[in-house]
Image (cartoon, rainbow, N blue to C red):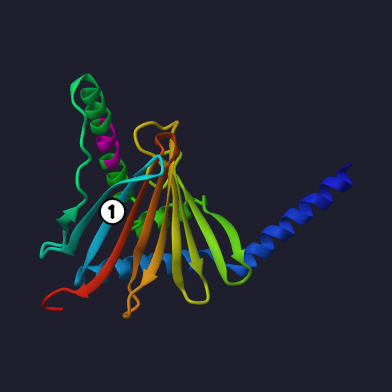
Amino acid sequence: MKKKYLIISVLIFVGISGIFAQVDMKETVAMIKKNLAESKANMKKYSWIETTTTYLDGEQKSVKQNQCYYSVDGKLTKVETGGSTPTKTPGGLRGKLAANKKEEMGNYIKAAIAKIQTYLPPDAEKVQQIYAGGNVAIQILDPGKKFKLSFPNYNEPGDLLAVSIDKIAQKIMGIDVTTSVDDPSQKVTFNITYNNLPDGTQYAGTTTLDAQAKKLKIVIENSGYRLAQGQ
């Protein structure tokens, strides 16, 4: 029995060693930090269009667009440029109930979108702190090329931020987050696909939030990047 456990332990050790041989954790976390910091700084040179589409129970409910740019004091500014026609609410008691439900869902959607922004862009120093605490997990996506690093308790206890990277290209491919909005027992997930601008700046191209308990999906797309005036 002891021999059996010894063999299993050796196999586990070999497996873990094989993973670490393919990805240098310190080097990889440094690459993630570098990309996040550089992209955050470079984004201040651009303006772009943010399109937010909301689906409830599979049905599209609204589409809103914002013109986004960084003001001279470094703050992200969003100016609404248009949206979908509001849904008509029936009258009477039925209308009041529908209006209350609509308001409740509207508040949840605002809270969900605000929650997304607390993870975008990920904070390079938080990533470093979690790594320094020895709590980063590795998943191989493509041996020797692509990996996913998971950072637990990134923003709050019980959440998880995972960064998928292309080691060869030295780029972030995407980010997955598991968290909650107003009820810790109701988990929500969102997935971010990263794209690249001509100068190498990386940005969140498409962000999709899925709140299954609410039958809600929110898709945020960033497009139309242009250098701001004076750049």
From the top left corner, tell me how far across and down residue 58 is, in percent: 41, 44
Name the one closer to the observer, 226 or 140: 226
Eyeballing the image, is 207 above or below 44? Answer: above
As helix, strand or loop, the secondary structure at mark 1 comes to strand
Answer yes or no: is residue 30 visible.
Answer: no
Residue pushed farthest top? 93
Q: Residue at x 21, y 57 (%)?
A: 65
Few, some or many residues within 10 Å of mark 1 (<14, 14–19, 20+)? many
Q: How many numbered marks are there?
A: 1
Name the one closer to the observer, 188 or 87: 87
Secondary structure mainly formed by the magenta segment: helix
Q: Residue at x 11, y 78 (%)?
A: 230
Q: Which residue is mark 1?
A: 52
From the top left corner, tell me how far across and down residue 187 is, in percent: 44, 38
Amino acid under disc 1: Thr
Horizontal placement of 187 versus 91: left or right? Answer: right
Horizontal placement of 148 versus 67: left or right? Answer: right
From the top left corner, tell me how far across and down residue 175 is, in percent: 44, 57
Magenta stretch bounds:
104-109
Name the one closer to the observer, 154 or 119: 119
Residue 190 included in the magenta stretch of the image: no
Name the one closer to the observer, 22 or 39: 39
Answer yes or no: is residue 86 visible.
Answer: yes
From the top left corner, tell me how far across and down residue 51 is, in percent: 27, 58
For residue 143, what is the image quadrant? bottom right
Horizontal placement of 29 versus 86: left or right? Answer: right
The N terminus, quarter of image: top right
Residue 106 included in the magenta stretch of the image: yes
Horizontal placement of 32 versus 39: left or right? Answer: right
